[in-house]
Amino acid sequence: MNKINKIKTLAGVEMPQLIYGTAWKKERTTDLVVQAVVQGFNGIDTACQPRHYREDLVGEAVAQLNQRHGVKREDLYIQTKFTAVDGQDPDSIPYDPTAPLKEQVKQSFAQTQKNLGTDYVDSLVLHSPLNTLEALMEVWTAMEEIYEAGGAGQIGISNCYYQNVMELLWTNAKVKPAVLQNRFSPETGYDRDLRTWCNENGVKTQTFWTLTANPHILNHSTMKDISAKHGKTAPQIFFRYLTQRGISPLTGTCDKTHMSEDLQIFSFDIDEDDIEAINGLLYS
Ligand SMILES: NC(=O)c1ccc[n+]([C@@H]2O[C@H](COP(=O)([O-])OP(=O)(O)OC[C@H]3O[C@@H](n4cnc5c(N)ncnc54)[C@H](OP(=O)(O)O)[C@@H]3O)[C@@H](O)[C@H]2O)c1
């Protein structure tokens, strides 16, 4: 079986460098998560956001994996998110939207525990920063309390594209963000400066939209040459490039072959020249 690299975050969590994403899978969520883990994934990303994620069916998958495949809870890295009201479908908000923010986080996490059938998650991520520093820190403080009570191995943030927001959070937080999960897109310049800041401060970065935002990179002749040289697909080369740079991509593939190809990325390395060539495609 292919082994997924793990990196240690500043909270001491061993985080897989390739994580299986569960958005938009609806009623297929359980089967796909079971299949992904049986094939070799050990990291799962979800959210307490019924609009896009069936966190309850991720929980069903975790139960099935345990009962039928002997996969223990501690063998898995489970990551979920708190999503504020403006990211929720008004008809399916998993907490009382009129409650104070701190209470919303508590209620959302209680729903997560119920959905996933577990007392703790390995990573609790704030889905997006809130509009004011005061609101952001109220939510963050509630997440810190969950972390301090042992409900989360680490806390992190997503969709945070401004370094000043990240720095404000960092400065005001008692428990520092261990991960930043952002889209990997030319529209945000691939977060180049922000990523440097994260590296300097020990914040590990995860990416989504890694393939969908980058057809121009995946189809570029340079990428095709590197793929041919290694006998790997362009997505495999791109994922390997990211992981060799210390970045952890998410993949939400529904395809068995793609799952297997994605899992093979740790069985080879690309060289410095390949890395420089892909840097050139992204940043020139
Ligand atoms: N924090 C946030 O706001 C946020 C937002 C979006 C997503 N996410 C997370 O990120 C996860 C991943 O989402 P994503 O937006 O990056 O897209 P994705 O669900 O991974 O889909 C990417 C596309 O790439 C294809 N693909 C995957 N592996 C491939 C391979 N080896 N070769 C060729 N094609 C491949 C998939 O098609 P096939 O299914 O046919 O393979 C799919 O069409 C989500 O499930 C979710 O957990 C988070």
Image: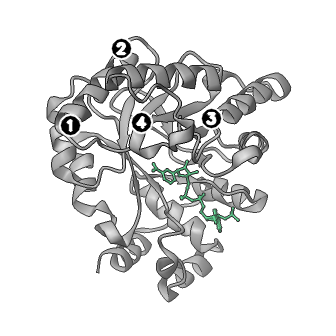
x then y, percent, for residue 250? 53, 52
Give the mark nearest the N terminus, 2 or 1: 2
Cβ–Cβ under 8 Å for marks 2 and 1: no
Viewer-nearest residue: 124 or 266: 124
Binning the other alpha carbons within 10 Å of mark 2 as few (below 14), some (14 to 19) or many (20 upward) gives few
x then y, percent, for residue 284? 29, 81
Binning the other alpha carbons within 10 Å of mark 3 as few (below 14), some (14 to 19) or many (20 upward) gives many
The vertical placement of 33 against 261, above or below, is above
Q: Which mark is residue 148?
A: 2
Q: Is the shortest distance between ligand 1 and the CB of mark 4 under 8 Å?
A: yes
SS for dot 3: helix
- Residues at marks 3 and 4, CA–CA distance in whole angstroms: 14 Å
- Residues at marks 2 and 1, CA–CA distance in whole angstroms: 18 Å
- Residues at marks 2 and 4, CA–CA distance in whole angstroms: 15 Å
Give the mark nearest the N terminus, 1 or 3: 3
Q: Which kind of residue does numbered mark 1 sit on?
A: Leu
Cβ–Cβ under 8 Å for marks 1 and 4: no
Disc 4 target residue = 125
| Point 41% across, 74% down: residue | 278
SS for dot 4: strand
Give the mark nearest the N terminus, 3 or 4: 3
x then y, percent, for residue 237? 55, 68
Q: Which mark is residue 55?
A: 3
Disc 1 target residue = 169
Quadrant hosting residue 34: top right
